[in-house]
Image: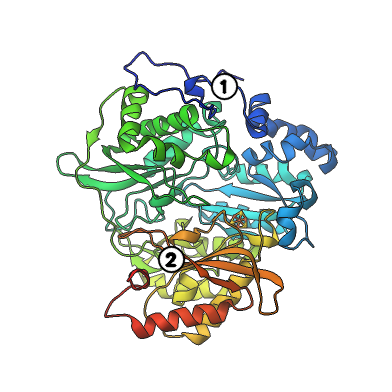
Amino acid sequence: MPDLRFKPQAAQKTEIPRPKRAEGQWALGYTEPLNKNEQSKKDDDPLNVRDRILHTYSRRGFDSIDPADLRGRFRWMGLYTQRAPGFDGGKTAQLGEEELDDRFFMMRVRTDGAILDGPALRALGEVSTAYARNTADITDRNNIQYHWVEIESVPAIWERLESVGLTTLEACGDSPRPFLGSPVAGIAKDEIIDGTAALDEIKRRILGNPEYSNLPRKFKTALTGHPSHDVAPEVNDVSFVGTVHPEHGPGFDLWVGGGLSTNPMLAHKLGVWIPLDEVADAWEGVAGIFRDYGYRRLRSKARLKFLLADWGKDKFREVLENEYLHRRLVDNPSPASPVAQGDHIGIHEQKDGRFYVGAAPVVGRIDGTTLTGLADLVEAYGARGARLTAYQKLVVIGVAAEDTAAFADDLEKIGLTARPSNWRRSTMACTGIEFCKLAIVDTKERARRLVAELEKRFPDLDTDISVNVNGCPNACARTQVADIGLKGQLVMDDSGRQVEGFQVHLGGALGLNPSMGRKLRAHKVTSAGLDDYVTAVVSAYLEDRTDGERFAAWVAR
Ligand code: SF4
């Protein structure tokens, strides 16, 4: 394993006092592991587990897997053991991970904002039907997520995915997680700048590169050149957001340190403009700061946002310029403001005269049959392919003008719709108790029933109200930035029994006025009472709103 410890640069250094208490910051000399995760990463580069999966574990079976690989390094290959059936939410805190482990895996395939053409969609579909019991979820990080994968199948799955340019590498773990890219990059008429080349370059430099395989924790990247800011840049560790500099023209605003979970923080705008061909350098600089200065003592403090909170954005920029990029960055006096909603649902003309069609499954849940059906449609209509969105939806690109209506009709036949209700369009759900070992409550199925019920109760809703359903405080489906954010927990029902339920956060938003939803202590609802709770809140809003007043603004009054 190469020595990845911080090497002082010759250039001017920012004075950073050594804290009294070791936080495990490599750059300050704290290189001894301070917890078992850090020890495991030091013992062996997690990237090395790929060979053991291919040549040992897949041949000898589940029981041959070293526990340190099973519950640690496997994540760098996009693999987690899934939750064994039969354990309710109360068991999540009581039992150890070992007791909740199933012998099957969840597997994430990263797409990083790329277009999935017919062969790629077909491969994704075939893997699902052949090896994953026909499961496939579109996540809010541009992934396809399978379940029920057996260790013996992994080599064949990788071979099939790699044959169409797809990978599960570093889809989880303390690594550069899958990138969020604009679903309409290079095709939207109103695009500021196409960031595709920059995302490709970052991926080429860092994926599988041991310089970035041991970060303090996960590291999330988003990049968009679309004015709707369609990749949730406020809640990623590093984001590049299309903007036009008054002198230098189109480029990217650099934002750092966003993240949700139990200490949610919105990203800081560093006030710098990055040209397209310097995005990958800037990415490496930000990731390098995180690797070298990030906190490695407590896992709960190991995200970049905590370093930003302590340093502030000016110091962060100074370290980035002085120690990593060795040059001054261009000031950006006019950070971009987003326009409209960025989910791209519906039928829209591209700059080349063809059309893109944004379609919604229900809460991201599709299956292998749907993916294969989509591959058939893409090929039959001569479309370029599909991209996944940051909202658990997909966008088909390159449909001929005269085919759009027929194409949308054919999408309906495979369970996707370009004309969803506002509820279907604006509801997301994380994996939840069905498969996730950290979950306390069911999410996907509960959210599906909620959407169906709200479509009946509010069939003509004339505004979008986002509902994000999460199975625990980790906020994988972005609890705090939804109009109605739901955090799974156990709550008391009327008879005093502990049952599945949610803590409610109201009035969160991304975009023009980003804000964290208000956590209203009194607003705890049982899972069984969720339909009625949402109905009551939405009815109050519809009765009370002023002209054009959005839900979040109404909550903030
Ligand atoms: Fe699992 Fe919690 Fe994330 Fe949902 S929010 S996927 S329950 S860790």
Q: Residue at x 66, y 79 (%)?
A: 494
Using residue 53 as the reference point, say whether residue 245 is left or right of it.
left
Q: Residue beneath label 1, please?
A: 31
Q: Amino acid at mark 2?
A: Gly
Which residue is nearer to you in this view: 46 or 255? 255
Which image quadrant for residue 435?
A: bottom right
Task: Specify the quadrant that holds the C terminus.
Answer: bottom left
Q: Residue beneath label 2, please?
A: 358
Which residue is nearer to you in this view: 449 or 180? 449
The quarter of the picture showing ligand 1: bottom right
Can residue 391 be seen from the camera position used here?
no
Q: Residues within 10 Å of mark 2 (few under 14, many from 20)?
A: many
Q: Amino acid at mark 1?
A: Thr
Q: Residues within 10 Å of mark 1 (few under 14, many from 20)?
A: some
| As drawn, 523 above or below 342 | below
The circle on residue 464 is none
The tag earlier along the polypeptide, 1 or 2, is 1
| As drawn, 133 above or below 329 | below
Q: Residue 44: horizontal and vertical position, in percent?
A: 67, 26
Can residue 202 be seen from the camera position used here?
yes
Which residue is nearer to you in this view: 384 or 315? 315
Using residue 156 as the reference point, say whether residue 20 is left or right of it.
left
Q: Residue at x 78, y 39 (%)?
A: 58
| As drawn, 44 above or below 124 | above
Q: Determine the CA span between mark 1 and mark 2.
A: 48 Å
Q: Residue 415: horizontal and vertical position, in percent?
A: 57, 72
Q: Residue 553: horizontal and vertical position, in percent?
A: 33, 70
| As drawn, 248 above or below 214 | below
Which residue is nearer to you in this view: 200 or 389? 389
- State if disc 2 and disc 1 touch (CB < 8 Å): no
Label 1 SS: loop
